[in-house]
Amino acid sequence: MSSLLAQYQHIAWPSPAKLNLFLHITGQRPDGYHELESLFQMTDYGDTLYFAPNNTGEVRLITPFPDVPHDDNLIVKAAKQLQIHCQLNAGVDIHIDKILPLGGGIGGGSSNAATVLVALNQLWECGLTNHELATLGLTLGADVPVFVHGQTTFARGVGEQFTPAPNTDAVFLVIHPGIHISTQTIFTSPDLHRNTPSIDFCDYTFANTHNDCEQLVVNLYPEVANLLQHLLHYAPSRLTGTGACVFATFDKEEEAQQALLAIQHQQILDTKAHSFICHGLAESPLQTIIKTIFDVRD
């Protein structure tokens, strides 16, 4: 069972960021979950995970997260969930090169969990389909199925109902202001707008959409408000997810680089701020590597 895991333990498994190019909240279900509409944009920037077999039968995250207990990490939870679901006793050591900021609204934890499910499904030879993996992943977080699906896509429901979206060649400047925003805090706020009318995805444009979380986040976090105000001088800009990352959309990488240099020159970024430039992709690099190495077409 660990033969493929040993064979491919040096593979760098991508765990990419996503951007919510818009996020409409169209209602709230009796179970407390929100009905959403969004465009999930896959990118070429993210964390990298490595998997190696161990003889203990345990899931061990070798790279610690200072503020997250080992067994509470979505990386560990995802691997254990797959173990239990497939009735396996194979152990795995997991390393991660972590560059995505926590609490950024770019799906770092959910992406990590999805990469674990997708990679170990192959390495442990579980034989689950992407649909089955997405169903498992939904119990870990609403965004996990998006990353398992691995396509730039329109989404409805709690983020698990997908509609194909057109490819984009956009370049994004993404800035995390160095603060943590709790998704639970935003989604439980009585001030959150929850009744945006549903849209026809065929009519989508960036200009005729918005992020229903943005005004609330701007009101609560002046760092985000200040950053958005500056970014809007250079390009159309928006909060992604529940924050704290904001992004600006450009046609060319050179334009994004110039905007970043200008903002850095103005010294408005905290020393804890994290900035990066990424490209929009039609397909997640995780799915690309699965198709390339394992010839999987799900």
Image (cartoon, rainbow, N blue to C red):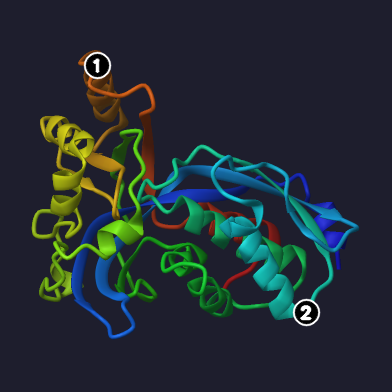
Identify the residue at the far right of this view: 55
Tell me, for residue 46, which label it has, or none: none
Q: Amino acid at mark 2?
A: Gln
Q: Amino acid at mark 1?
A: Gln
Q: Which residue is mark 2?
A: 87
Q: Check the picture and name the quadrant holding the C terminus.
A: bottom right
- How packed mark 2 is, by other alpha carbons closer than 10 Å (few <14, some 14-19, many 20 or more), is few
Q: Check the picture and name the quadrant holding the N terminus.
A: bottom right
Q: x and y percent of residue 134 in the render?
A: 52, 74
**Which residue is nearer to you in this view: 141 or 288?**
141
Between the C-alphas of marks 1 and 2, the distance is: 53 Å
Q: x and y percent of residue 17 in the render?
A: 43, 49
Q: Is residue 222 left or right of residue 245?
A: left
Q: Which residue is mark 1?
A: 267
Q: x and y percent of residue 293 in the render?
A: 69, 57
Q: Secondary structure at mark 1?
A: loop
User: Based on the displayed image, in which of its 4 quarters is residue 163 positioned?
Assistant: bottom left
Say whether residue 102 is visible: yes
User: Residue sitting at 17 percent across and 33 percent down?
Assistant: 231
Q: Is residue 161 left or right of residue 118?
A: left
Say whether residue 166 is visible: no
